[in-house]
Structure formats: structure tokens, C-alpha cells
Amino acid sequence: MSHNTFGHLFRVTTFGESHGPALGCVVDGCPPLIPLVETDIQAFLDKRRPGQSRFTTQRREPDAVKILSGVFVEERTGRQVTTGTPIALMIENVDQRSKDYSDIKDKYRPGHADFTYDLKYGIRDYRGGGRSSARETAARVAAGAVARRVIPEVSIRGALVQMGPHRIDRTNWDWAEVDNNPFFCPDAKAAAFFADYLDGIRKDGSSIGAVIEIVAEGVPPGWGAPVYGKLDAELAAALMSVNAVKGVEIGAGFAAAELFGKANADEIRFGNDGKPLFLSNNAGGILGGISTGQPVVARFAVKPTSSILQPRATIDRHGHETEIETKGRHDPCVGIRAVPVGEAMVACVLADAFLRHRGQIGEGRAWPFPI
Ligand SMILES: Cc1cc2nc3c(=O)[nH]c(=O)nc-3n(C[C@H](O)[C@H](O)[C@H](O)COP(=O)(O)O)c2cc1C
């Protein structure tokens, strides 16, 4: 039994291992006539691609995506659009150098899925973690790019808001800064601090965790399906399924436990445009599992990279205690590269929620209701 598919109407199935010939995904349920070319997808893969700064792994993967199916050139406009049939996306693995894996072939790397995969399946692809490798997240990012085309009116942006114990100063938040530093950090001052901080961690052969925030703006009220398809529940499941994610919050999240009722419940007025306006957004744009029309805000915690240069205690598959040390370069903070992955998962969940909302409710209704 295996689970490589998520979503209901917008369904994503990913396939492939880190050291196989290729990995990718099949997106089933994407509506027809949506303009889609490879460069739409490539732009997002380039954000996740390794080797772009000294703070991410130096594995050289171009991560070039190929659309294998599900698109056709529309005669009337000359544009390539989706046909409504399955969209298969493929990314070749080109940097899977034949290395010496003898040290990790039988030993379980602490913090990795080696132990659990071996116990469960009795066989595992030890080359780079195989299916458990976060290389799989490239396929999620590709699917997320398609999802964004399904809901073009929604803007989905992610940012690194904490590294180790160091939080950004939210009063410095500037989305334009996210593309100006190697951390996807919206606070320029914090980004400058993170550079020195992470250099020190990298030189020690260690690693550190991070918190990522994803903000989706332009989500209309109504998306999300109570009670088992609540938008917050689906976002949490999708983000939690990303490698190394150990916690997810929506809106105020765990901090809500420290608030009094009046401070937490977002009061409502009308804005200048005559539309309902929440005076705060502790709910993260979701009430009762349904979007309110406010920005949808999700945050997730990424654990520190497990493959570090420091030797650690472990056991092998034959029942011996031993030690293990990861050689070569490593990502000192995988939370950085998790930013585009988190955005992609939110995009897929929202595209799916939109299609289901349209399926059940259609165009919706005029509001406010007459007396
Ligand atoms: C984008 C991304 C890149 C990652 N790269 C690495 C890596 O280079 N080294 C590592 O030890 N873990 C890396 N991880 C985390 C592991 O894939 C993950 O910890 C491991 O598969 C065990 O799964 P779990 O942490 O979800 O339990 C990465 C995670 C993400 C999201």
C-alpha cells in the first residue's frame, strides 16, 4: 500500500527517486484551456534549485522540466493550453554521480527515513535517500506552478521568518526583500544577520531549523469543505507532508493559546470598499474550515538538516551499534529551500479547494441577504 497522490479534483501524483533517471508528477483534474508552457513552471523550480548560494547544497541539478502530456496549441489563439487531460511533468536527475555509498548502505542516518523505510519495506534505495529524498519536492513545486495557473487571481508568497531562535522583525517586512537575499527573508536586517549566523553553523559542520510563513492573498470567501475537507486541515496535512516539516500553524497558531477571547476573535466591520473587513487576522483567513476572504496565513517549522559533518551514533540493518558521518557539502538550513515547496503545497490545496467549491456552489450567491 502506498500514498503518492494528494488532492481531490486537482489531484497530484508524484513519482521518482533522487538517483533514478528522472522524477516528476502527473496532475490530473486540471481544467482545460488554461495557458501553460514550460517556462511557467521552470520559474518556480529555479527558486527551489540547489547550488544557488553558499547556504544551500552544491548538488548541480538544472531541474529542467518537460511537459509530456496534457497540453495542446489552441488553433484560435496559437497559445499552448491545458486540454483537461492528465498533465505529466518530468525532471531529469543529471547529477546522480556514482558515489561510494558503502558507508550508508547498511547504516541508518539519524534523522533520515532510512530506519523506517527499511523496517517497513525490507528494501530501500540508499542512494541519496531514494524516494524519501527531498528531491521529490521538485515535483511538488512543478505541480504547484500548474495550480497557480488554475487560480491566477490568488497570490501565494512564502518567506523565511525565523532561523534557529532568531525571529525577523515583522515591522521590517518587505516582500520585495524576499528576492534580494539567499534566505527568502522579508527583513533585510535579519537576512544580513542570518548570513553570518549560518556561516558559523556551516563551518562547524552543523545545521539549524527554520520557520516559513506562506501568505495567500486574493482567496475569496467560501473555499474549504467542512467538516473533513476544512481548508486549514488540508493545508496542515499538505505542509506537514513536506520533508523535514515538524509543525504547522494557521494564523495566530500556537500563540492563540496565550490570547484572551476578545483579543483573539477577529472583529468585523465594513471596509471602504463596502466589503466585510476583519480588524485582525488571528484566524489566518479561515473560519469553520472556510476561507473568510482575508489573507490565508500558514506557518511551518522545518527541522535542521540531518546530514551534518559531525559524527553520530547509529545502528546498522544487521543489528550492530556503529557511528556515521556525512561527507561533503551539506545544506546548513533546509528551511531555506522549503520556501518554494511550501508555496507550491498551498497552491495545490487552494486550486483543489477552488474546484470543489465551484463544483458544489457554482458562482455563489449575492450577499448580504435581503431581510
Ligand atoms: C527542500 C528540502 C531539501 C532537503 N535537503 C536535505 C539535505 O540536503 N540533507 C538532509 O539531511 N535533509 C534534507 N531535507 C530533509 C530530509 O529530506 C528529511 O528530513 C528526511 O527525508 C526525513 O523525513 P522527515 O524529516 O520528514 O521525517 C530536505 C528537506 C527539504 C524540504
Image (cartoon, grey):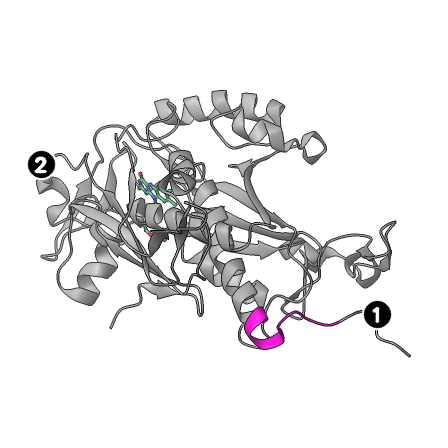
Examine the rendering and report whether any part of residue 79 can be seen: yes
Q: CA distance from mark 1 to mark 2?
A: 67 Å
Where does the image place residue 177, in percent across and percent down from the top left? 59, 27
| Residue occupying the point 45% across, 26% down | 198
Span of residues in magenta: 357-365
Displayed quadrant of residue 203: top left
Question: Height in image: 358 above or below 149?
Answer: below
Q: Earlier in the sequence, mark 1 or mark 2?
A: 2
For disc 2, the marked residue is 100
Label 2 is placed on what type of residue? Asp
Q: Residue 338 in magenta?
A: no
Percent across and percent down for residue 228 are 53, 76
Residue 28 screen position, x and y as percent:
36, 64
Q: Which mark is residue 368?
A: 1
Kindly indicate whether the residue at mark 2 contacts the one at mark 1 (C-beta within 8 angstroms): no
Q: Nearer the viewer, residue 248 or 298?
A: 298
Name the disc covering residue 247, or none. Answer: none
- Between 231 and 359, the one lying in front of the other is 359
Tell me the kind of residue under disc 1: Pro
Please indicate whether residue 66 sits to the left or right of residue 101 in the image. Answer: right
Label 1: which secondary element: loop
x, y percent for residue 142: 37, 47
Q: Is residue 364 magenta?
A: yes
Ligand 1 found in image quarter: top left
| Quadrant of the frame with the N terminus | bottom left
Q: In which quarter of the view is residue 26 placed?
A: bottom left
- For the C terminus, the quadrant is bottom right
Q: Nearer the viewer, residue 273 or 327?
A: 273
Quarter of the figure with residue 65: top left
